[in-house]
């Protein structure tokens, strides 16, 4: 009798355990969404740009006159990144075609700014990354060469000034970025000797530029 009771108890225990195991359902695996890509802006880069300039020349002894023309050149720099904050140093060198001229009372005729001049700048950059975009501001020292002419006489000078601007940069691939940028530059006055008549002129420029760069 004892053996029968023990066997019955063991059978009941096994049946209860099997039934409890049947009630336990395996939870389906939780799907893990792929992590959003993280774009790293730090490091060196170099690229090329094209754009359009509008210039305003101020001159002693005459009214201001305006000019405009296409610009193009190359740029490069180095970015550092801390979280979403991006900062660095950038330089550019370019060339612009310019169509400008205005009356100058000292010469008694129209003074023209000849087509073509070289320019460059060295600037700091700060921005905030909203991947895959970077919104940035920039500012620094600018240098430009200008040539003024009157009749058969001409003279050229190098102007020093400042440049400030802002723009948006986009990460096209891991190694290619594109940008759209606005820049304002203001240059000091220089004296031009036009056939014995000295004309003092400075100028400022506004520029819209589009560029594409390779990250290294």
Image (cartoon, rainbow, N blue to C red):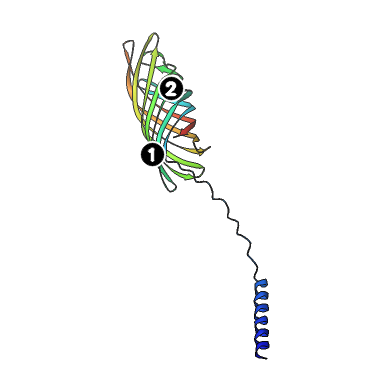
Q: Earlier in the sequence, mark 2 or mark 1?
A: 1
CB atoms at circles 2 and 1 under 8 Å apart?
no
- Determine which of the numbered discs, if any, sits on residue 130 in the image: none
How crowded pointer 2 is (Cα within 10 Å; few <14, some 14-19, many 20+) is rated as: some
Residue 82: image location, x then y, percent: 40, 47
Frontmost of labels 2 and 1 is 1
Residue placed most toward the observer, 10 or 74? 10
| Quadrant (top left/top right/bottom left/bottom right) for the N terminus | bottom right
Residue placed most toward the observer, 92 or 195? 92
- Determine which of the numbered discs, if any, sits on residue 95 in the image: 2
Residue 176: image location, x then y, percent: 50, 35
On screen, residue 144 above or below 8: above
- Determine which of the numbered discs, if any, sits on residue 88 in the image: 1
Q: Secondary structure at mark 1?
A: strand
Residue 36: image location, x then y, percent: 54, 48
On screen, residue 1 above or below 59: below
Residue at 33% of width from left, 10% of height from top? 195
Residue at 47% of width from left, 41% of height from top? 135
Residue at 58% of width from left, 53% of height from top? 33
Residue placed most toward the observer, 29 or 6? 6
Residue placed most toward the observer, 107 or 6? 6
Image quarter of residue 18 = bottom right
Residue 185: image location, x then y, percent: 40, 30
């Amino acid at each position: 009798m004892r053996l029968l009771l023990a066997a019955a108890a063991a059978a009941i225990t096994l049946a209860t355990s099997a039934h409890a195991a049947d009630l336990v359902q395996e939870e389906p695996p939780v799907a893990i969404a792929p992590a959003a890509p993280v774009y790293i802006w730090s490091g060196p880069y170099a690229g090329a740009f094209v754009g359009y300039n509008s210039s305003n020349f101020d001159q002693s002894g005459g009214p201001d006159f305006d000019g405009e023309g296409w610009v193009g050149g190359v740029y490069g720099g180095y970015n550092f990144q801390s979280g979403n904050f991006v900062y660095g140093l950038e330089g550019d060198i370019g060339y612009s075609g310019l169509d400008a001229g205005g009356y100058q009372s000292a010469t008694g005729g129209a003074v023209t700014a000849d087509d073509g001049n070289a320019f460059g700048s060295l600037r700091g950059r700060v921005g905030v990354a909203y991947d895959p975009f970077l919104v940035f501001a920039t500012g620094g020292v600018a240098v430009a060469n200008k040539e003024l002419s009157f009749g058969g006489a001409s003279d050229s000078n190098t102007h020093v000034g400042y440049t400030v601007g802002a723009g948006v940069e986009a990460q096209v691939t891991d190694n290619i970025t594109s940008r759209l940028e606005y820049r304002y530059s203001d240059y000091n006055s220089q004296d031009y000797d036009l056939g014995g008549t000295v004309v003092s002129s400075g100028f400022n420029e506004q520029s819209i530029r589009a560029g594409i760069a390779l990250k290294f």
